[in-house]
Amino acid sequence: MQTSITVALAGNPNSGKTTLFNNLTGSRQHVGNYPGITVEQKEGYRLHKGQGILFVDLPGTYSLSAYSVEELVARDFIINEKPDVIVNVVDASNLERNLYLSTQFLELGLPVIVALNMMDMAKSRGLIIDHAKLETLLGLPVVPIVARSGKGLDALLDTILRITEKTQTVQPLRINYGADIEQALQDLHPWLSRCTSLLKLYPERWLGVKLVEHDTQIIEKVRACSPEDADKMLARCEETANHLQQTLAVYPEAIIADQRYGYIKSILRQGVVSTTLVKDRLYTSDRIDRVVTHRVLGPIIMALVLFGLYTFTFSFSGSMVGWLEEFFALLNRTIDGAMADGPLKSMLMSGVVDGVGGVLGFVPIIMFMFFGIAVLEDSGYLARVAFMMDRIFHFFGLHGSSVMPFIISGGIAGGCAVPGVMATRTLRSPKERMATLLTVPFMNCGAKLPVLTLLIGAFFSAHQAWYMFLATLLSWVMALLAAKVLRLTVLRGESTPFVMELPPYRFPTARGLLIHTWERTWQYIKKAGTVILGISILLWAMMTYPGLPEGRVAAYETQREQVQAQHAGKSDAKAFEAALLAVDAAEATEHLRNSYAGRIGTSLEGVSGLAGIDWRTNIALVGGFAAKEVIVSTLGTAYSLGEVDPEESTSLSRRLAADSNWNAVSALAVLVFIMFYAPCFVTVVCIAKEAGSWKWALFSVAFNTIFAFILAVLIYQVGRLLFLN
């Protein structure tokens, strides 16, 4: 018996695949990224009857085409890693759509088990599924399960063990694609038969079908394998495509998809599915959607849901944030009492504790936010948000599929722009894709969340939920306006139609919610302990060195001696201590100004001052080009270097609120600037890669920064006239 069986979990989005993965593996999971790709890779382990089973949760995908990064990741893993068995998770209440992926696994000749999930949902809809008959007609094992409750999981695990013990080769499924395509496949045979290296990985007929579909990845592989034959094969495929266009006005891809669906229908109509419901009965999900996706009530409900999410987050996380602030303050006092003054002590207190600690202090807010988002995702509500936003997106020249990249990037605060940029691959129109790609960084990603929370908590603490809600609305409005400008100028063109499937509503499971919340929170903590730590220490060094000239240090020593002389013999100890602290604070401020980072911040102050942004904040904003979380850690370091009395150590939000350079208007201007200025470095690289040119990446940096600065200047100057004079 082998030491471990590798099982790939595959399925459509919303099929319950991840719920099944969580129930099978529990806490025995590892989350990372596929090499060179930002798509998340999940692996988990399960021991069943003495046999170890490694489960790999593939990205949710509707097919194995080359239209999106998720499809390519799933396909490449299956072909290159050769899992022992594929468990295809299928939504029993939507068999026709879900079995489309199953047919493609069968065409590849792979060992497949169909996990017929959501049998309870199908039953509630009056659907009766004869899984034994489906198993006979498909020629592969079909196991009915309910992933969320764990029903049928033992039978599924038993089937996995049984299938992996078999040694016979699975014969690829052969679907007839009609005379034209079949003739093309026959004509491709002599050339493909010479691609021996590819035939070790793929069935020959499947390669031919992919060439007819104009699959770019397979075309590249064929060119690399047989350059002399590749052009002949592509010319033959082009001839077929032109003929189908002239005779049927369709593309080969449409014919192939129709034939696959025809194969599925021929199976389902042989008594596999029957119903006990009357024709006009509305399902529970349909009843809910009549209200939730209503043209008028839908957006109002969506706004209330988002506001409720922020209210929940700030209401429940407040005390935990306070505890963490007290912990890091105590840690600083401990370091101060245990170590002698010097660079190491300064680095630990200002670079590590105040830098990284400032970021980690927002973990409770991040955790509650991610929990709320997980509820919206797992319940099926986020799909409704995408559906409703499609109507608006068309007006601004975007495709309905642009909604999900926006949401992934932080349309509901807490996402990430990198996978959001990657998600634009699902858009077929190049101009709609480019417009989406350039505007998703406007969303409030998880990296911006601590910064927004810091400023809102410091200056608008009485209305935190309202301000976060308004910040979310502002990010959407500005992103759509920017997209409209792009679509009217450099990216002119018509919008393409959008069709999406709305999954049924489900009650999220506690286990699933906890796993999703922990995964995302842990990613945030790891980033704070690695990337942010490194950048914080680097910026601490830039804010510490080269130090003041000896003459200036001596001048401050002279001032201290003068203070001591003035207070000699006087009993007012507090006045004496305050005078000394004033000298120390002045020296610390001049020291910071004279540092490498201080010089950069000061040089920018002539321009940034128009938006109420001082030189200390400039240092943080420059650091924010690397990663937006660095803004909080850099502000923490910059303001702690100027805090000379560790016994009076306060949180960063209190320091900002007490600083004379800050007020509600300047805080609002800085907040808006941070929301919209240049994407972080990783996102810029990703934009360059996806757009195929650094020109668009640099355009994104320049356009976003100029746009953000103009907006910040307007807010500060108008606010100063209205409220500060």
Image (cartoon, rainbow, N blue to C red):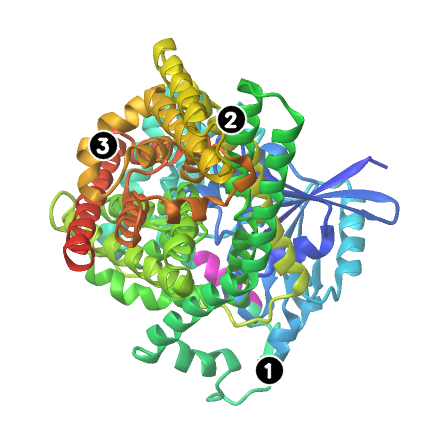
Q: Residue furthest front?
A: 569
**Residue picked out by circle 3:** 605
Q: Is residue 261 highlighted in magenta?
A: yes
Mark 1, residues whose alpha carbon is within 10 Å: few (<14), some, or many (≥20)? some
**Residue picked out by circle 1:** 126
Point 40% across, 22% down: residue: 562
| Mark 2 secondary-structure assignment | helix
Of pointers 1 and 2, the one earlier in the residue sequence: 1
Q: Residue furthest top?
A: 550
* In-image side of 355 versus 109 (left or right): left
Mark pair 2, 3: CA separation: 26 Å
Does residue 199 lie above or below 448 as drawn? above
Point 26% across, 60% down: residue: 393
| Mark 3 secondary-structure assignment | helix
**Residue picked out by circle 2:** 534
Residue 636: image location, x then y, percent: 45, 37
Q: Nearer the viewer, mark 1 or mark 2?
A: 2
* In-image side of 249 versus 351 (left or right): left
